[in-house]
Amino acid sequence: MPATQNRRMVAVILLIPLVVMVALWAFAWPAARLAPRDLPVAIAGSAPAADRLQQQLEQRDGAFEVHRYASEDEARHAIENRSVYGAIVASPRGARLLTASAASPAVAQLLREAITAQAPDGARTQVTDVVAAPDTDPRGSVLGASFLPLAIAGVLSGSAVTLLRLRGGRAALTLIGVAVTAGLGATALTADWLGVITGNWWAEAGTLGLTVLAIGGTVAGLAALVGPPGIGAGAVLMVLLGNPFSGVTSAPELLPGPVGAIGRLMPPGAGGSLLRSVAFFDGSGAAAPLLTLVLWAAVGLGAVLIGGRRRTRPPVVPPARTREPALAG
């Protein structure tokens, strides 16, 4: 018994600091390396001035993905469709900047600083916010902070159905019920009370609920297939990796290396992108994140149903062999 206690003590001493270090790396490293990486921006206007602006942007190798448009109206349309984060309109009198702080306040600020730095001394750059963030959340901090509680809610729902030994259809219905309730409650708080999202109420509730369902289904599905350790694996995947890699507080194109691409394919990142689309852009750019969430939810619920059927199936007992009566001699 003392040897067992000693091993447990050593495990606690080593594992908890390790988890803290992983969490610190996952949250702090992307935030400390924010910079534009193939950030989609547009240039519109007269050819000579636009060419000069494009050359200036392309000098920052790999920072911007430049899209050219013939007119300011086309550039505005691209911003409203979420094809680009902003646009520079070139003219003989100077450059004007179009931003969309609703897509990412961090990117809007970055573009404003970049264009101001390139402007001639004493020249002022006119900035127009085409799709502005709401006055109640101009920096997007409230919207960004909303997804960690959603991730926790999903992990808790997946853990609850596992620890309460709910199986199959009951587990799936419980996960769906939690997602619906959480989506309605979260939308009531963020839209009605705080006023930080301003689009279609039911679309926003569906987005938040589907995000919780995708996370909860994944956690419960892993637990149904591999047992209780699946809860820990799902929590690490969604909270320690999915949330800081989501880019909700900045933008996926500002995160280092493959982190932004990975975050887009996980429920927190897909949920954040889908919420911005339905809340501020009338659903533009919603197809890819919606498909991502649906796939996560479907695979997770499918694993829950398969795992529940496998565990509740009664064991097959071979029929007893009957002994034939001995023949009378």
Image: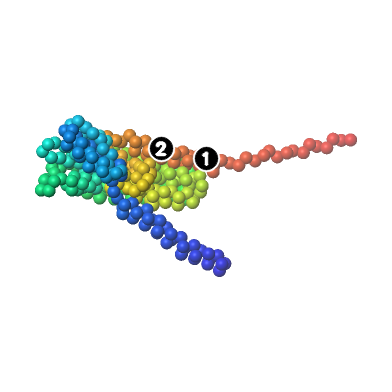
Which quarter of the image is occupied by the N terminus?
A: bottom right
Q: At which x and y percent is residue 288?
A: 34, 36
Say whether residue 181 is left or right of residue 196: right
Q: Residue at x 19, y 36 (%)?
A: 50
Q: In this rendered view, identify the residue nearer to me: 41 or 52.
A: 52
Identify which residue is drawn at 47% across, 42% down: 304
Q: Nearer the viewer, residue 246 or 312?
A: 246
- Residue 309 is marked as 1
User: Between marks 1 and 2, how big is the CA–CA gap?
Assistant: 21 Å
Answer few, some or many: residues within 10 Å of disc 2's Cα (few below 14, many 20 plus, some between 14 and 19).
some
Q: Amino acid at mark 2?
A: Leu
Q: Which residue corresponds to mark 2?
A: 295
Q: Judge from the rendering whether residue 102 lies leftward or rightward of residue 325; answer left or right.
A: left
Q: 63 or 265, which lies in front?
A: 63
Residue 24 vertical placement versus 85 (above, below): below
**Image position of 179 (left or right of 103):** right
Quick one: label 1 or label 2, which is nearer the N terminus? 2
Determine crowd level at label 1: few under 14, some 14-19, many 20+ residues with C-alpha closer than 10 A.
some
* Amino acid type for the residue under numbered disc 1: Arg
Mark nearest the camera among 1 and 2 is 2
Q: Quadrant of the C terminus?
A: top right
For this orientation, the residue located farthest to the bottom is: 2
Q: Secondary structure at mark 2?
A: helix
- At horizontal 55% and vertical 69% (from top left) the residue drawn is 2
Q: Could you tell me residue 101's position as x and y percent?
A: 21, 43
Among all residues in the image, which is located at the extreme right?
Answer: 329
